[in-house]
Image (cartoon, rainbow, N blue to C red):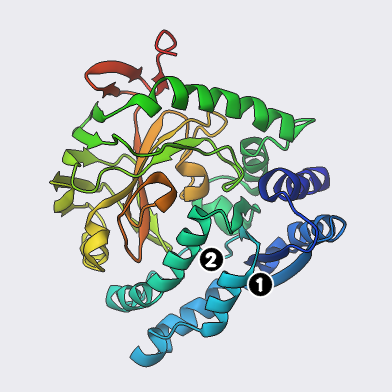
C-alpha cells in the first residue's frame, strides 16, 4: 500500500492544504503513522514549506488525566497557544493506537480539562473563520482503529483508502468531480432553506437555518470529506431525535442517545449506555446543551459505521448534529469547550425543507436537484 500512502500525502499537501513556500506547517499524529508523516514531510519540503512534527500518544494523555491535580489539569500551556496562533497550516493524522484510553477517567476531570482548553478551541475556530489557518484531518489506518471498526487490518486499510479515493488513478480529479455534486445540492436546495424538518424512527425534529451559511466539505479540511453542514439558529431546535449509532467522544462510547430539545436547548437526555457521562458533558458549559452543527453525510464510498467520526459523519445516507461549539464561518454563535458529533441513519427517513419533501431514504431527490 506504499503507493496509496504517497498518493494520500500528495492529496493532503497539494489539494487539501495547498502548501506554499515558507508555510509553517504543524503535523501531529501517533508514532505508528511515521510512514505517512515521512511522505508528508517530503511533500512539504519540496514545495518550500517548513514542517514541524509533534508525535502524540494516548498512553501519555491517560497518565496526565489520571495523575494531574486540579491546577495542572486546568493549565493551558502558552507554548500551545503560541503555536496555534503562529502556524499557517495544521495536518492532524488520525492514527490512534488505543481508542479507550480515557474510559476509566472520572468524567468530572474530563469536564475540567475540556473547560480549561476552551480558549484553544476558540483561537482555532476564529483563525479558521478568518481564513488565517488552513487545516486538514487525515487518516492513517492502525490496528486499534481496525478493531474498533470490527474489521481486519487489510479490510480496514482498503476501506480507508477507498473513502479517501486514493485507490483511484487521479484522486484530485475524483474529489473535484464529487465536489461539483455537493455544490449542486448546496446551491439548489440548502442555500434557500429556512426550516428543516427531520422525520424518522423515534425522531421528529425541526431546525431553523435561515440566514446561516452552508459549508461544502470538499475534503480539504477533512480527508475524507463528503458532508454539507451549517450552524443552526441557536434557539431554534425543537423536538426529539434518537441517534442510530453510538456517540463516541474522546474514546468514551455512549449508546442509544435520545435527546429532547426545547427552544434550542437539550431539556431531556437518555442513553442505554453511558448516560451519566452524557449528562456530565452536557453540564460542561451553557453551549454544550445547544447544537453547533447540523449536517448531511453524502460520501457513499463510506457505507458502514467505524466508531471514527472522521469517517462516520460522512456516511452516505446519514445526518449528524454536534452538541457544543459551532463554526463561526457558518454564522453559528454557539460557544463551548466541546464539539460532539452524533449520527443518525436516514436510509429509512425523510427530510422536508420549508414543507417540501427533498430527501428520502438517504438521498436528495433527483427531481429536486
Q: How dense is the environment of label 2, judged by Cα within 10 Å: few (below 14), some, or many (20 and up)?
A: some
Residue 169 is situated, as x and y percent measured from the top left of the image, at: 80, 30
Label 2 belongs to which residue?
98
- Total label count? 2
Residue 205 is situated, as x and y percent measured from the top left of the image, at: 20, 34
Could you say which is closer to the camera, residue 126 or residue 274? 126
> Is 146 rendered above or below residue 164?
below
> Is 53 rendered above or below residue 310?
below
What kind of element bears circle 1? Answer: strand
What kind of element bears circle 2? Answer: loop
> Is 147 rendered above or below residue 236?
below
Q: How dense is the environment of label 1, judged by Cα within 10 Å: few (below 14), some, or many (20 and up)?
A: some
> Is residue 98 shown left or right of residue 200?
right
Query: Which label belongs to residue 102?
Result: none
Q: Is residue 287 visible?
A: yes
Q: Residue at x 57, y 47 (%)?
A: 222
Residue 13 is situated, as x and y percent measured from the top left of the image, at: 74, 50
Query: Which quarter of the picture shows residue 231?
Result: top left
Query: Which quarter of the picture shows residue 113?
Result: bottom left
> Is 162 rendered above or below residue 148?
above
Residue lying furthest right in this view?
46
Q: Residue at x 26, y 16 (%)?
A: 356
Label 1 belongs to which residue?
55
Residue 339 is situated, as x and y percent measured from the top left of the image, at: 37, 57
| Mark before the other along the chain sequence, 2 or 1 | 1
> Is residue 249 shown left or right of residue 200?
right
Nearer to us of marks 2 and 1 is 1
Could you say which is closer to the camera, residue 53 or residue 349? 53
> Is residue 194 shown left or right of residue 160?
left
Q: Is residue 274 visible?
A: no
- State the CA–CA distance, disc 2 to disc 1: 15 Å
Amino acid at each position: 500500500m506504499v503507493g496509496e500512502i504517497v498518493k494520500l500525502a500528495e492529496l493532503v499537501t497539494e489539494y487539501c492544504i495547498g502548501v506554499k513556500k515558507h508555510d509553517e506547517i504543524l503535523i501531529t499524529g501517533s508514532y505508528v503513522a511515521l510512514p505517512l508523516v515521512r511522505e508528508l514531510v517530503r511533500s512539504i519540503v519540496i514545495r518550500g514549506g517548513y514542517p514541524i512534527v509533534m508525535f502524540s500518544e494516548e498512553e501519555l494523555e491517560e497518565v496526565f488525566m489520571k495523575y494531574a491535580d486540579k491546577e495542572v489539569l486546568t493549565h493551558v500551556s502558552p507554548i500551545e497557544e503560541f503555536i496555534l496562533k503562529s502556524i499557517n497550516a495544521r495536518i492532524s493524522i488520525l492514527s490512534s493506537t488505543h481508542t479507550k484510553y480515557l474510559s476509566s477517567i472520572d468524567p468530572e476531570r474530563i469536564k475540567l480539562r475540556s473547560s480549561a482548553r476552551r480558549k484553544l478551541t476558540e483561537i482555532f475556530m476564529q483563525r479558521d473563520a478568518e481564513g488565517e489557518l488552513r487545516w486538514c484531518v487525515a487518516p492513517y489506518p492502525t490496528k486499534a482503529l481496525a478493531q474498533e471498526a470490527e474489521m481486519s487490518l487489510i479490510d480496514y486499510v482498503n476501506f480507508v483508502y477507498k473513502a479517501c479515493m486514493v485507490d483511484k488513478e487521479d484522486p484530485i480529479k475524483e474529489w473535484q468531480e464529487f465536489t461539483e455534486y455537493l455544490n449542486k445540492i448546496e446551491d439548489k436546495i440548502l442555500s434557500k432553506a429556512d426550516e428543516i424538518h427531520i422525520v424518522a424512527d423515534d425522531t421528529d425534529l425541526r431546525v431553523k437555518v435561515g440566514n446561516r451559511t452552508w459549508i461544502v466539505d470538499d475534503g480539504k479540511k477533512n480527508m475524507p470529506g463528503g458532508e454539507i453542514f451549517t450552524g443552526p439558529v441557536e434557539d431554534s431546535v425543537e423536538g426529539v431525535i434518537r441517534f442510530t449509532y453510538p456517540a463516541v467522544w474522546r474514546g468514551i462510547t455512549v449508546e442509544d442517545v435520545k435527546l429532547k430539545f426545547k427552544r434550542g436547548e437539550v431539556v431531556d437526555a437518555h442513553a442505554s449506555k453511558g448516560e451519566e457521562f452524557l449528562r456530565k458533558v452536557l453540564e460542561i458549559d451553557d453551549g454544550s446543551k445547544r447544537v453547533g452543527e447540523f449536517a448531511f453525510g453524502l460520501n457513499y464510498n463510506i457505507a458502514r459505521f467505524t466508531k471514527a467520526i472522521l469517517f462516520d459523519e460522512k456516511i452516505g445516507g446519514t445526518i449528524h448534529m454536534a452538541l457544543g461549539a459551532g463554526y463561526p464561518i457558518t454564522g453559528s454563535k454557539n460557544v463551548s469547550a466541546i464539539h460532539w458529533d452524533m449520527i443518525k441513519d436516514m436510509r429509512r427517513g425523510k427530510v422536508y425543507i420549508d414543507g417540501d419533501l427533498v430527501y428520502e431514504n438517504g438521498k436528495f431527490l433527483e427531481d429536486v436537484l
